[in-house]
Every structure is written in C-alpha cells, then in structure tokens.
Amino acid sequence: MTGTARAVLATGPIGARLQDTGISSEIATSAAGVIRFIVAFLAIYFIGRAVVVPLVNRAMTRRNLDAHAQKPLTLITQFGIIFVAIAVAFGFGGYGNFLVSMAGIAAAGALAIGLAAQNVISNFVAGVFIYTDKPFKIGDWIEWDGYAGTVEDISLRVTRVRTFDNELLTVPNSELTNGVLKNPVESDKLRLKFVFGIGYDDDIEQASDIIVEEAMDHPDILDDPAPSVRLTELGSSDVGLQSRFWIADPGRADFVRIRGEYVTSVKQRFDEEGIDIPYPVRTLEGGLELGNGQQVVEPAE
C-alpha cells in the first residue's frame, strides 16, 4: 500500500489533500473533521429548511391553526432542524456516534438552560399555555395589571401589545398567565356601563326613561338583552343612575365610539328636558388677614 493510500485511510480524502499541501497529519486530521462538520451541518440545515419547514406549515394550514399557534410551532421545528443538523454533523466530523452526539448535546443544552435560562423556561412554558388554553389571540383587546391594548404578536417568550396610545409593549408571557387577564372581546357580545349623575330635584323616572330611550335608538346598541337603568349612587351633589347596555362584535374602537355617541345623545336630551347634571359644590370657610391685622374675608358663621 502506498503512502498516499495510507494517508487517505488515516485522515480521509480531505485530510490527505491537506497533507499534500505540507500540513502535518495531526493538523490535517483536525481540519478535515471541522470541514466535514461544517459541510454536514449546512447540508442538513438547508435541506430541513427547504423540505421539513414547508411540510409543517402546510400541515398546520390544513388543520386551520391560528396564526399565533403556527408561529411557535414553526420556531420549534426550526430548533429541531438545528439540533439534528448539529448531531449529524458531529458524526460526520468524526467526533462520535450520532446517538451519542445527540445525547451529549441534549445533556449540555439541558444543563445550560437549567442554570442560565430559568426565566426563559418560565416564559416558554407560559407561551405553551397561551397556545393550549387560548385566553386571547392576535387582534384581541386585553387588559392586565393596569395595562390595556391590542395583541399584535405572540411568540414563545413574549407577547407584543399595542396600547391605545400607539405604544408597543413587549410583555413576558409569564406575566400574562400568572395574573388576572381580561379579554373583553372573547365573546360575541359585551355589556357596557355608564353612570349619569342628576340633581336631587330632578325626576328619576323621567331621566331613566331618557337613558333607556337613547340606548334603544342607537343602531349599534342591542335590543336583546334590553338596556336597563339602576339607581346606584347617592352622592354629595347628585343621584347616580347606572346605564347598562350591550353591543355586538365588540372591539376597542367600537366600544369607545358607541359609548361616546350614546353619552352625548343622553346629555343633549337632558339639556332639552331641563334635567341637570350637577357638579360638586364646595364651601371654603375661614378668614384671611393682612400683615397689619386687617380682616379681608370674614369667617363663615
């Protein structure tokens, strides 16, 4: 057997070519392993991206999965392709058996994640719960911990919410699953409430009739369930009448518009009928003296 044949058997064709350039056998063997690793990784990765990812996307589309569910599953598929590509590349690079390589990578990854990515794991698990429980979806208007906005994107780690002041909030998923979250648009109907304050001398029955009539006349307020009014407050300067009415296909824009139009129409009717919407009246007591002792304001008796 010639020296070239022995070099090919010992280091492979890539290593033999490198030795022909004058590189030592040890360096040639190491370099050949690195080259085989890179080539195998790139081949598996691009084949997976070109074949596996489209197949998974088509399968999710056939099952009519929501957009917020498809994105995390696509990311998991991509991570799986990278994992398999690394494991296979280890074997081709001569660094060990495929299964041994995969087990070693998995163990190292689990250790690194366990020590350095506890919050990431928490948010990842929360993202899985959001996917399975579906407390909200992209486009929903949600409220939590004093914040409110429309969901624009849901990923494995964070959810992005656009506030009604056009600010973008990036919220860790765990914050949305560990506390109380309100989704006003989850159902096909939403009940709204508004308190109208009238004077103590005004007719409560007349004011209640006006509040109900204006609700029934509004085209976007439902007749079934019917609007209603309850006396809920006896304030220091007014009587509180709470109006309750329902709207269909609720959304933040509809909610604000309908409530604004309705309150405006009730206020106009109150003005026409002479029903007062009083404001708080405060009486200040005490006196004011100048430096020379002259009394400017007489104390209230």
Image (cartoon, rainbow, N blue to C red):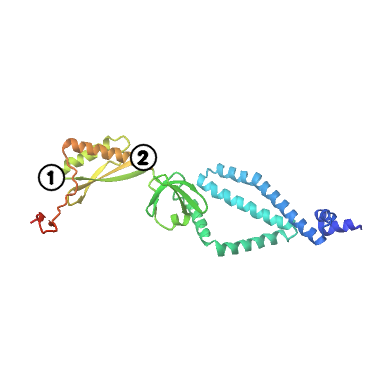
Mark 2 lies on a secondary structure that is helix
Q: Which residue is mark 1?
A: 201
Q: Residue furthest left?
A: 301
Q: Residue at 20% x, 42% y: name it.
A: 208
Give amino acid for label 1. Asp
Question: 104 or 147: which is nearer to us?
Answer: 147
Q: Which mark is residue 253?
A: none
Question: 300 or 64: which is nearer to us?
Answer: 300
Q: Against 244, is 24 above or below?
A: below
Q: Residues within 10 Å of mark 2 (few under 14, many from 20)?
A: some
State which quadrant residue 199 falls in: top left
Q: Residue furthest right?
A: 1
Q: Is residue 291 left or right of residue 158?
A: left
Give amino acid for label 2. Asp
Screen quadrant of the C terminus: bottom left
Q: Earlier in the sequence, mark 1 or mark 2?
A: 1
Does the image show residue 271?
Answer: yes
Q: Residue at 21% x, 38% y: name it.
A: 210
Screen quadrant of the N terminus: bottom right
Question: 263 or 35: which is nearer to us?
Answer: 35
Q: Residue at 74% x, 56% y: name it.
A: 34
Residue 172's x, y, as percent? 47, 55
Q: Which residue is mark 2?
A: 254
Real-space Cα distance between discs 1 and 2? 35 Å
